[in-house]
Amino acid sequence: MHPHHPATPRKRLYTKEQRARRDATRWTLVQGILAPAQFLAFAVSLGLVLRFLLTGEGYGAATVSILVKTGFLYVIMVTGAIWEKVVFGQYLFAPAFFWEDVFSFAVIGLHTLYIVALFNGFLGPTGLMALALLAYATYAINAGQFIWKLRLARLDMARSDGVAA
């Protein structure tokens, strides 16, 4: 069996109706703007966190950057749930994005734990930055999940249009 031609075709990510709703809603554009903005905030913050851990300098900047990144995360989660409701009829855990949503809760949980630890003094600066790195590792995995789904959606669209992907 050839790996690019499975015996059973993969289920499409969207039905025709869901694809039409996805393409018609402004929430798709909102997600399309927020996702790269959040990734940029992540990249800058990751650099600042690593700088602090390597040099001991820039704790304040790293902390602010983590809070900014976490703010983006909360906004994208709320707007993503709205997008999911419009496209799939439910706020979270639509079958097409079930595992991405499950993992998103781990990401949000770790980012929220960072905020709780920061404002309650549960961890020192190095512990907080280590927690931020753990949160960022889960975010990177989750971002990869969503990028993979974007790729699958494009393959589906090409297949629907009769174009070779």
Image (tube, grey):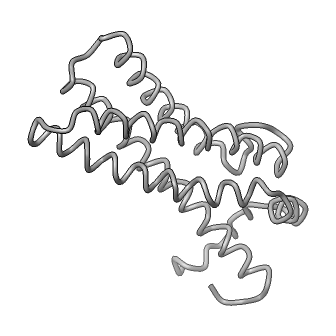
12 lies left or right of 61: right
Picture residue at 33% right of the left edge, 46% below the top? 45
Residue 113, compared with residue 156, is above or below; it is above
Picture residue at 74% right of the left edge, 43% below the top? 94
130 lies left or right of 78: left
43 lies left or right of 160: left
Q: Quick one: quadrant of the N terminus?
A: bottom right
Q: Residue furthest left?
A: 55
Q: Residue furthest right?
A: 17
Q: Quick one: quadrant of the C terminus?
A: bottom right
Picture residue at 66% right of the left edge, 73% below the top? 154
Give the tally of numbered discs.
0
- Foreground: 133 or 121? 121
Q: Quadrant of residue 156?
A: bottom right
Q: Residue furthest bottom?
A: 163
Residue 120, compared with residue 16, is above or below; it is above
Q: Position of residue 57 (x, y in %)?
A: 14, 38
Picture residue at 37% right of the left edge, 40% below the top? 65
- Foreground: 165 or 57? 57
Q: Position of residue 144 (x, y in %)?
A: 47, 56
Q: Position of residue 12 (x, y in %)?
A: 74, 64
Q: Position of residue 125 (x, y in %)?
A: 21, 24
Q: Quadrant of residue 7?
A: bottom right
